Image (spheres, rainbow, N blue to C red):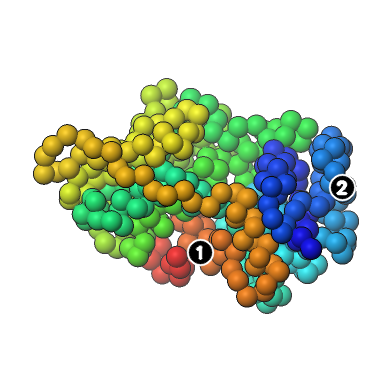
Amino acid sequence: MAVHIGIIGFGRIGAEHAAWLEKAEGIRAFAVADETPARRAMAESRGLKTFATVDELLDDPKVDAVLVSTPTAMHFDQAMKALAAGKHVMVEKPMTLDLPTATQLAAESLSRKRVLSVFQNRRWDIDYLTVRQAVQAGQFGKVINVESRLGQWSSCVGPAAKEYRPGWRNEASFGGGGLYDWGSHFIDQIWRLMFPAKPVRVFAQLRGNVWTHDCDDFARVCIDFDNGAVGLVEINTTTTRPLPRWHIDGQAGSAESAFSLEFNLNTWAAMEFTPAAGGGPRPVFRAAVGLNERQIWEQFGRAVESGDSAPAVTPASVLPTMALLDAARESSRSGTAVEVRDVVAWTY
């Protein structure tokens, strides 16, 4: 029997997950809870059972696990409610609004012996895997500087479902802003790229300039690592001249890849390395393809069924990302660097 998934929030992302689950083995979308009639009608047209409330979905004994794909500010309460109902839980990124609630959610899943995972699917993007492979192979020698950017003149978060508050992702009260959106992926990537080096301090500048005024459409996060390297994550949706997607400097040379307004991963993965010893640029060897979204769901399903295997993304591996997001917001508020060395266990 397949693991039955109940989707809480059938907006744009929830509907994408349903499509991925259609192709997955051993796990499938079964039901949807959404307060918006138009979104329930869309789910019904795909053959999914629908409910107007989360409680109704959680009361259905045929629902084995849930996906929480609502606005970020709702993640914690809905995931905790699902765990209390005995359901396994997949949460869209970011896990919650902050590290304390993420830690509480992780502890709750352990105490109830339920599988909890976070959809940090960009751990397997081909551009990130290519950069990581080159770093681990020693192509750069000692890494000095890593810059990870997204730039464009348009709100990076885009519209949500038009039937439900389409601008929520640019509203702070819902957990909007570029830092939580693309930033939660890029920060997750960069600390994992540098591991076993660990972050020691964070300095950030978060600004709402064009597309939002109560959260950020410009986010710059600088991270000092304990091996002396410097990392930078920048989400800048207020530029008409985007900088490269990746730029890496090391004692053996430097590399970068171009931006792509279409978020094309192949463009981002097409890196050129210029050696410090001289000679022209040469391509960086492309990494093997990583997990896709269907495979992430299949691994989650196996973890639910077996009880002794782990999902692709464990809660412990996401807590460092949450710590860095917290530090970035605190640094921007205070205008000072925030120490993070002992805030969390840096578990890869």
Q: Quadrant of the N terminus?
A: bottom right
Q: Which residue is mark 1?
A: 317
Q: Nearer the viewer, residue 39 or 234?
A: 39
Tell me how many marks there are: 2
> Please, what is the three-letter code of the amino acid marked with disc 2?
Thr
For residue 25, which quarter of the picture? bottom right
Is residue 293 left or right of 64 when viewed as pictured? left
Q: Which residue is mark 2?
A: 50
Please state the horizontal and vertical placement of residue 64, each as a whole percent of the image. Answer: 78, 63
Local crowd size for mark 2, using a 10 Å CA cut-off: few (<14), some (14–19), many (≥20): many
Q: Secondary structure at mark 2?
A: strand
Q: Residue at x 76, y 43 (%)?
A: 10
> Please, what is the three-letter code of the amino acid marked with disc 1?
Ser
For residue 278, which quarter of the picture? top left
Asked whether residue 328 is in view, the answer is no
Is residue 36 left or right of 261 when viewed as pictured? right
Q: Residue at x 62, y 46 (%)?
A: 175
Q: Secondary structure at mark 1?
A: helix
